[in-house]
Image: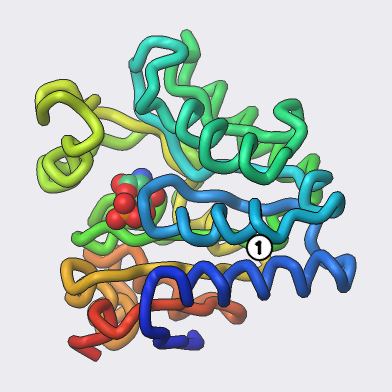
Amino acid sequence: MRIVILENAADLGGYASDRILKRLAAGTLRTLGVATGSSPLSLYKELERRWTPALGALNAFALDEYVGLPPGHPESYASVIRREVTDRLRLDPAKVHVPQGNAPDLAAACAEFEAAIAAAGGIDLQILGIGRNGHIGFNEPTSSLASRTRVKTLMSATRVDNSRFFTDEHQVPRHCVTQGLGTILEAREVLLMAQGAAKAEAIARAVEGPVSSMCPASVLQLHPRATLVIDEEAAQQL
Ligand code: GLP
């Protein structure tokens, strides 16, 4: 695990975009795993600024989605990914995949999502954020380290954290669909971005704690090419 500590969010976005553009130029990046949340926004803005046609040709797979939000809901991850990723990076919407949270058969939709990743040749570079409880994607504590894309129940702490995007906590769905920890570990490279003191404990547990399902991000200790790009506040408990 590589830890890169930088001063602020703009620096994080600069570092991550350098990495992506370098791999694009080398021809080793065809499929990008993208994350929602505020942590990767500086990256998407930087990529929009430094856009190249090769960037616009990428396939993209999102990590997760809420279950049961009406189609087109502005806070569904399908909508967030369209606004923050597909539009900014000028991707072909047909090449952007978000797990379905409204399918009549969610288990079948999860299996199809895994099959689509495999058909694309796997994920070359996965962008991640981290929750205060150490979740990645929506893999909450106790998630199996070998898990695949599936339905999960959100913890109340996560629903409280994410209520800032809704009118109140009761509007935040109780369930989600998320790539599993086993799915994420199969990405060829992982880049986790975190900023702010609120993430410091989760970062310390992920880096210095035992590999444990109680801190899902700790599974990245098992990944041969995982980089954590964090600001000084997120690094303060290391
Ligand atoms: C949500 C997402 C995660 C994200 C996390 C942190 O729960 N499902 O993928 O990493 O929020 O969000 P933020 O970056 O806004 O702190």
Name the residue tied to disc 1.
125
Q: Is residue 43 visible?
A: yes
Residue 150 location, x and y as percent?
A: 44, 36
Drawn side of residue 59 relative to residue 204, left or right:
right
Q: Quadrant of residue 197?
A: bottom left
Amino acid type of the residue that numbered disc 1 sits on in the rendered structure: Leu
136 in relation to 219, above or below: above
19 in relation to 164, above or below: below
Q: Quadrant of residue 66?
A: top left
Drawn side of residue 58 relative to residue 141, left or right:
right
**Which residue is situated farthest in the bottom direction here?**
238
Q: Is residue 144 visible?
A: no
Q: The residue tagged with tag 1: helix, strand or loop?
A: strand
Image point (21%, 87%), residue name:
236
Residue 224 location, x and y as percent?
A: 60, 81
Residue 77 location, x and y as percent?
A: 44, 32
Drawn side of residue 82 relative to residue 64, left or right:
right
Of residue 235 and residue 205, the one placed in the foreground of this image is 235
Judge the density around disc 1: few (<14), some (14-19), many (≥20) Cα neighbours within 10 Å.
many
Image point (63%, 67%), residue name:
17
